[in-house]
Image: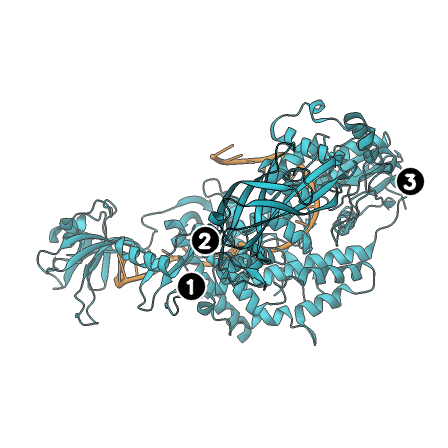
Chain colours: A cyan, B orange
Amino acid sequence: MAQDATGSGQKLVIVESPAKAKTIAGYLGPGYVVESSIGHIRDLPQSASDIPASIKGEPWARLGVDVDNDFTPYYVVSSDKKSHMTKLKKLLKESDELYLATDEDREGEAIAWHLQEELKPKVPVHRMVFHEITKQAIQAAVANPRTLDTDLVEAQEARRILDRLYGYEVSPVLWKKVMPRLSAGRVQSVATRLVVDRERARIAFRSASYWDIEGTFDAGERHEDRMFPGRLHAVDGSRVARGSDFESTGQLKSSGVVHLERARAEALVNALHDTTFEVRSVESKPYRRQPYAPFRTTTLQQEASRKLGMTASQAMSVAQRLYENGFITYMRTDSTTLSQSAVNAARDQVRDLYGAEYLPDSPRTYASKVKNAQEAHEAIRPAGETFRTPAQTGLAGQEFRLYELIWMRTVASQMKDAVGQSVSVRLGGQASTGEDVVFAASGRVITFHGFLKAYVEGRDDESESDDSQARLPAVEEGDEVSAAALQAAGHETKPPARFTEATLVRELEEREIGRPSTYASIIGTIINRGYVYKKGSALVPSWVAFSVVRLLEEHFERLVSYEFTAGMEDILDEIAGGRKDRVSELAEFYFGSDSVEGLHKLVTELGDIDARELATFPVPDPQGEGDHGIVLRVGRYGPYVEDRDGERGNVPDDLPPDELTPEKARDLIANQSGGDVELGTHPETGLAIVAKAGRYGPYVTEVLPEDAPKKEKPRTASLFKSMSLEEITLEQAVQLLTLPRVVGVDPESGEEITAQNGRYGPYLKKGTDSRSIESEEQLLTITLDEALRIYAQPKQRGRAAANPGKELGEDPASGNKVTVKSGRFGYYVTDGEYNATLRQGDDHETITLDRAAELLAEKRAKGPAPQKRGAKKTAKKSTAKKTTKKATAKKTTAKKK
DNA sequence: CAGTGAGCGAGCTTCCGCTTGACTT
């Protein structure tokens, strides 16, 4: 069995993170070599270049999963992990035993399994697990190993394969129907939908305005806090409406409340000038607040955002540095549990810093708030068996501030509750106009601050936080109180706030979507795809996101339902428990069942997805002006608005969807034509000449009279590269419009030679024979003699003449000359017969003959001409071609930007 | 989204989760 063993007695322990390896090595001592896997070591092929040759020809190669044979996944060692795997193999060779000590969760178990598959150990293998990194825990773990949990690995593979099928099958639908390079996925699509849904709610929102009275009251000089604020609460026994009494439609939803308008509120203020108020009631309730649980990834991200203004990824990268340098425990965790030694350290610090009266009798524990928590790690806390105070760390800047936050939160989590009294006072009085009015004042007195002494959580809105509320004087029922100031105050109900990074992450976590290691990058994904952009800290969806979300909702409803992931988690749990089978679950997802429509069918039957319809939205109409007939369309070149007459206007990329109104749209349409530069009238035709910015760049055109026959098209001409919209003169425009210009007649053939500008630059044309010329200016100046001289030369075909390329040498296979050339799709090598585009990682400057020969050989292997391989294949080919066309068009515009 | 003239090689995009550096600015 241990024939390869060295007899050295050395044991190899593999964990996931290098920082962890370092710490654990210290706890295990000599005889153990601790290395890390640095996360996952292999994965399904990510792109075409990763696909192993053995499966390249398969129809499912693109997926990396053999959907027809039990969804067998094909894994490849990621290129950046190859050298690391060599190192691990070498270490294993020198060892007698292998401990797979990856995290004890679904992904960790899978990493352990992949390691075993890839390392093929011939020595005994143990699975070792621990949930906290203390000497005790580590030594206990190494003494009590178990075996690999293959059901858990199955669950991970199911998760991985499902995500691949979802992502790699649905994304191409978006390329075809919306735009190339878009993406869909179990997590990102729901995240995008959340942002879009919120924007929809904002668009549908109708604000309501309401008034009340703000007062400052004076309880008299015998009170310490004599002045206190109060707000109008009721008039003649009916409660005054406040924000929460209104629907999002602006309608009042509560009955029996008075909706105060400005005039009534101001009249009341006047009628209360001489009123003396009486305390009608004083209600006091005990107040008690428990400390917050220690940080996990999402709560750390939220507080770092609220208190330190960090983005989710900034918070994570600062935390990463703290972790690597041994200041905090692992920062990607869904657990709020503290190890015993951490609890002790926190309690010690409470006693030292705040005194024993702040220390609860027994340690506090926090139940997990996360339903699918995998609890492979501790909560995020200061590292070590005793905590360093921030000052003792020697840290500075962001690292200091984040450490301080983590330290305070951890210590506070082991402190006593804050207790006090919440007091609510009602003041009554009579207006001179006869109404009975009631004002309300509320306050809080904290008698014991408890944990609030150490830590107060930030708020997303500016409502009162836990430690700040007005103090009220100790008034009693029947006391007289005067109003020091009264003022009518107007309010408006506000639409639901946009998500920020932090609130979106919190929402995703609550819906069990995404994992601690991915929360920050989800934001990056939806921003990079152009689904969402940041306006300050708010996340605003683009119109493309509206299109994509609508397509997914209408055709892949289940996949973007907010419950999909939760349902998947349940199934994965069943698989992990050995009660369900990976293959049949994936088969149901992909091929469907009686109750579920399969993904495969959905993505192959796209005929009824009407792309134009999906990309068309009526412009929101908050004023209710009725049928304004203006729509927004998401076009290839971005969003634009179009009115009934087909007049269009570009919508700026940074105009938030909820700010687009019919009025704004009309503005955009008007400005579109207003953006044209009127140059004057043509001296001969009398027509107005305008310069415009067009799809192919700036151009000039003439404005035909309204009554001109439809057939008649205005003359147009692109500006020369030396001209600009700002500087062009009428004279230049008139000259441009003379193009195409007749240069003369070829005496030999009798054909007319003309000079004009075209797609590929300036050229001459004689019948069907065309020749490029050097400069645009020549279009206006070239003489017949010069033109004839050009035609006397043989036609230079292709780029070959202009760009002969660089010769590399002779192809050993064909014996042909191999050259590198630059073409429409970038650089390629050719041997005169076959052409092969350079791949990612190839460089046209440095490419060698060998590499070129390799590329050409691959090309040759594919056969000379595309072979017919049955009707199905041909059909597929034609759709592929269509996307190609789209992609090229998109590229052109992208460049222009 | 203005309208032009030929002809040259297609190949690839995309998912979620685990981890760090290696990059550039």
Front residue of A872 and A308: A308
The kind of secondary structure element at disc 2 is helix
Mark 2 — on which chain does it sit?
A
Q: Tell which subunit mark 3 falls on.
A: A
Residue A769 in the image: state x and y as whole percent: 23, 61
On screen, residue A237 versus residue A447, left or right, reads: left
Chain of the residue under label 1: A
Ranked by sequence position, the earlier of labels 2 and 3 is 3
Mark linked to residue A621: 1
Disc number lying in front (2 or 1): 2
**Vertical side of A315 occupied by A861: above or below:** below
Question: CA separation, marks 2 and 1?
Answer: 26 Å
In this orientation, does residue A835 appear?
A: no
Q: Give the class, few, some or many, for how many residues have Cα within 10 Å of label 3's Cα (few <14, many ≥20).
A: few
Residue A761, given in percent of the width and then of the height, sits at 27, 52
Asked which secondary structure carries label 1, the reply is: loop
Q: Which residue is drawn at 21% across and 49% down?
A: A776
Residue A879 visible here? yes
**Residue A358 found in image quarter:** top right
User: Can you tell which mark lies on residue A143?
Assistant: 3
The foreground one among A222 and A140 is: A222
Give the x, y percent position of residue A138: 85, 37
| Near-viewer residue (A813 or A324) | A324
Is residue A552 shown left or right of residue A16?
Answer: left
Residue A7 appears left or right of A777: right
Residue drawn where x is 88% and y is 33% of the image: A8
Q: Quadrant of residue A617?
A: bottom left
x and y percent of residue A263 in the render?
44, 54
What's the amino acid at mark 1?
Answer: Asp
Which residue corresponds to mark 2?
A262
